[in-house]
Amino acid sequence: MTGVDIYVMSLITGDFFYSDEKQPIGLNAVGIGLDKEEKIKNCVKASAINPFYSTARATCLALLIENGFTDKDYPIKTWGK
């Protein structure tokens, strides 16, 4: 399931701005330019069609990185279990 077993990353190869902030070139977690509330909101969403793979949970890795890979404020309660 995305956000538990699968994490979404992006490969930035040139100038890319998100929220008027230039993002680092290379492999990055999707949502690194968002504030914590936006990361949580986008990590909670799931696809009604296929909850096991959904780009709606694309910011979950960015949230885990911000939390130091702990379950603090992590909205998906099955993570790490």
Image (cartoon, rainbow, N blue to C red):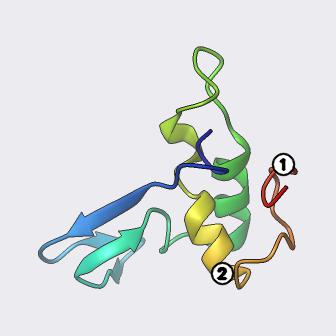
Q: Which of marks 2 and 1 is nearer the N terminus?
A: 2
In the current view of this chain or complex, which residue is farthest to the left? Answer: 14
Q: Residue 78 carries which label?
A: 1
The percent position of residue 73, horizontal first and vertical second, equals 85, 68
The crowding category of the residue bearing disc 2, from other C-alpha atoms within 10 Å (few below 14, some 14 to 19, many at least 20), is some
The percent position of residue 30, horizontal first and vertical second, equals 44, 62
Image quarter of residue 71: bottom right
Residue shown at 61%/25% (left/top)?
47
Residue shown at 67%/50% (left/top)?
4
Q: What residue type is labelled 2?
A: Glu
In the current view of this chain or complex, which residue is farthest to the front? Answer: 81
Q: What element carries label 2?
A: helix
- Distance between the Cα atoms at labels 2 and 1? 18 Å
The percent position of residue 72, horizontal first and vertical second, equals 87, 73
Q: Is mark 1 on a helix, strand or loop?
A: loop
Using the image as rendered, state which of residue 60 and residue 70 is in the foreground.
Answer: 70
The crowding category of the residue bearing disc 1, from other C-alpha atoms within 10 Å (few below 14, some 14 to 19, many at least 20), is few
The N terminus lies in quadrant: top right
In the current view of this chain or complex, which residue is farthest to the top? Answer: 49
Residue designated by label 2: 66
Q: Which amino acid does label 1 sit on?
A: Thr
Left or right of residue 15, residue 48 in this image = right
The C terminus lies in quadrant: bottom right
Left or right of residue 14, residue 45 in this image = right
Q: Residue 15 carries which label?
A: none
46 shown above or below 69: above
Using the image as rendered, state which of residue 33 and residue 59 is in the foreground.
Answer: 59
Residue shown at 53%/34% (left/top)?
54
